[in-house]
Amino acid sequence: MIVEPGPLLAAINSPDDLKKLSPEQLVQLSTELREFIIDSVSIYGGHFGASLGVVELTVALHYVFNTPYDQLVWDVGHQAYGHKILTGRRDRFPTNRRYHGMSGFPKRSESEYDAFGVGHSSTSIGAALGMAVASDYKGEKDRQHIAVIGDGAMTAGMAFEALNHAGVANSNLLVILNDNCMSIDPNVGALKEYLTDITTSRTYNKVRDELWNVLGKLSKFGPNPQHIARKVEAAMKATLLKQSNLFEALKFRYFGPVDGHDVQHLVTILNDLKSIPGPKLLHCVTVKGKGYALAEKDQTLWHAPGLFDKITGEIYKKVPDKPQPPKYQDVFGHTLVELAEANDKVMGVTPAMPSGSSLNIMMAAMPDRAFDVGIAEQHAVTFSAGLATQGLVPFCNIYSSFMQRAYDQVLHDVALQNLHVVFCLDRAGFAGADGPTHHGCYDLAYMRCIPNMVVAAPMNEQELRNLMYTAQLPENAGPFTIRYPRGEGVMPQWRTPLQRLAIGTGRVVREGAEGGVAILSIGHIGNYAVKATEALLAEGLDTGHYDMRFCKPLDEEMLRDVARRYRAIVTVEDGCLQGGFGSAVLEFLADHNLHLPVQRLGIPDRIVEHGSQDELYKECGFDAAGIAQAVREMGARVAAKSVSVHV
Ligand SMILES: Cc1ncc(C[n+]2csc(CCOP(=O)(O)OP(=O)(O)O)c2C)c(N)n1
Ligand SMILES: CC(=O)[C@@H](O)[C@H](O)COP(=O)(O)O
Ligand SMILES: [Mg+2]
């Protein structure tokens, strides 16, 4: 099905075309752009509410500024669909987030209009400031630099680090704060309260109302005391908002709050701001999901709803004919509550992903023991460390790729002090359609090299539960990482009894023929190895399979047995090959003089783009067919070697 753009939108192939419209036509264009996004996302999927919320802002920005010469940086980039459509990518939209298709986020390699590659939050101000300082250096005085950042992204330390720098850099930087009072879930924290306060101007309104009343009652001010009051009010507003304004305190000129859905007013304001040099912030108030009633109402659900019927609003769900396995994230969420009910030391922490991690289950059941700390991965880790110093056992759940932000905190605040923090890294391995910014490729490698750290990955729901149970036991006090992928596991009946696992022990999935090949897998990808061994058996190749469960410490006894029994090994991980699980196996074999050929399967040393998880496993050669092929090749290799030795 093709989505037809409205007549104005159909004629826009670049911002130059947009600039031919009159300011009055921008209202109609905004309606058409919004319709196009609704139609497209309903059919092709992707992020939804955030782009709807910035339609007018997007139109106004490209209308007023001279992009791409003026540099426009979108924070996170999940709201940039309108930007992509107006900058020559309208007709590519059906490929959005598809394998080999357009990226769901701005990407420098995709368009000159994408000034900065994004996906992770809170980078926009720093990047735009870097561009602004570079322009200063090059003498490009006329060049504008704009960062569009949401209220959620503004909660991160990185955003404040950049504001702190920009305030004294005096470069030509415009920060647009897109304040819709939402993150993916409702935004949290004191900054949110502050923004709500200045948006509704509670303090100012209160003082103004009191003054108004007093003056209205006093006849001694003359026939129209409220005329005087208006003048006083204007002066008071300027003083009150200026003196107490956080951004003004950081040496930004603060403008707003303004209605972010009034496109013509936005054009006027942006034109005015263009001529004001130095750091300035425009506070826009918008509605996430604007223009699609259901998305305005349930903003979390409609952040990225999947495919839906745009008329009825029904979100399509596959109706299975038999019970399906749950998502790993839900197993985490329910199991954590179970553990917390039995152990009053167990706590939960998420940096802004309560729904995505399913920590919201514990937040609802035990609100005093589960915390959304905002988009603040570093803080989430150090906060967890603080809890642990007091004998509590925090489960700090962070998406694997977002944890990259908090590496020093894991090392410095947790591992060095050997604190009992359990890191649950969701979205480990390929994240899928979100692409390289979100793939959790590196965690096995980056966690494995940290002293005191246990690193484990479950192959199924039961193992996730058992690992979580094991991790919180007092005997395992110390840092403990459990990583698992996006999506479903394999066990429809997943509420298995909780069992302690001995640290550093694997599990024999299948004992293969002696002298053959053994597959060593870590985590959920082991299920693809099961399919491979079944296919190989049908060909007469009886292949061993070991679910190692722990990347650190490795099951050394199991490895010695494997080295004795088989003549070659294939390791499989949905993580980077450099320094990951396969590397750990190689190190062990080398360190113990165990000489047998090893083929490592995993994520190669290059950027793997977006696509479905299965497409990416295939691309990297570790789907079931790829694993089976590697075993065949290893089998042939050792067979050839033994023939030549005997000859
Ligand atoms: C470092 C990092 N942590 C978490 C996320 C996940 N994430 C993506 S969008 C988002 C909410 C952003 O809220 P806001 O900036 O207000 O934008 P809105 O969706 O409201 O437009 C979150 C938490 C991320 N992309 N990057
Ligand atoms: C933009 C962003 O970072 C999130 O919206 C992310 O796409 C969520 O990913 P999941 O769908 O895996 O929770
Ligand atoms: Mg927001």
Image (cartoon, rainbow, N blue to C red):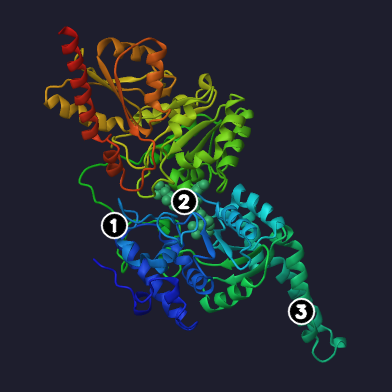
Q: CA distance from mark 1 to mark 2?
A: 26 Å
Residue type, label 2: Gly
Residue reaching furthest to the right: 220
Q: Quadrant of residue 377?
A: top right
Q: State which tag comes first along the sequence, 1 or 3.
A: 3
Count of numbered circles on the image: 3
Of discs 1 and 3, which sits in the foreground? 1
Residue reaching furthest to the left: 539
Q: Which residue is mark 1?
A: 316
Tell me if label 3 and label 2 are in contact, CB under 8 Å: no
- Secondary element at tag 2: loop
Residue type, label 3: Trp
- Secondary element at tag 1: loop
Q: In the displayed structure, would residue 494 be above or below residue 353? A: above
Asked if the beta carbon under badge 2 is closer than 8 A to the nearest atom of ligand 1, the reply is yes
| Residue 535 horizontal/vertical position (percent) | 16, 29
Q: In the picture provided, is 531 more to the left or to the right than 558?
A: left
Comparing 173 with 212, the one in front is: 173
Can residue 405 be seen here? The reply is: yes
Q: Residue at x 28, y 53 (%)?
A: 317
Q: Which residue is mark 2?
A: 119
Comparing 148 with 306, the one in front is: 148
Q: Which residue is mark 3?
A: 212
Q: Quadrant of residue 560?
A: top left
Of discs 1 and 2, which sits in the foreground? 2
Q: Residue at x 34, y 57 (%)?
A: 96
Of discs 3 and 2, which sits in the foreground? 2
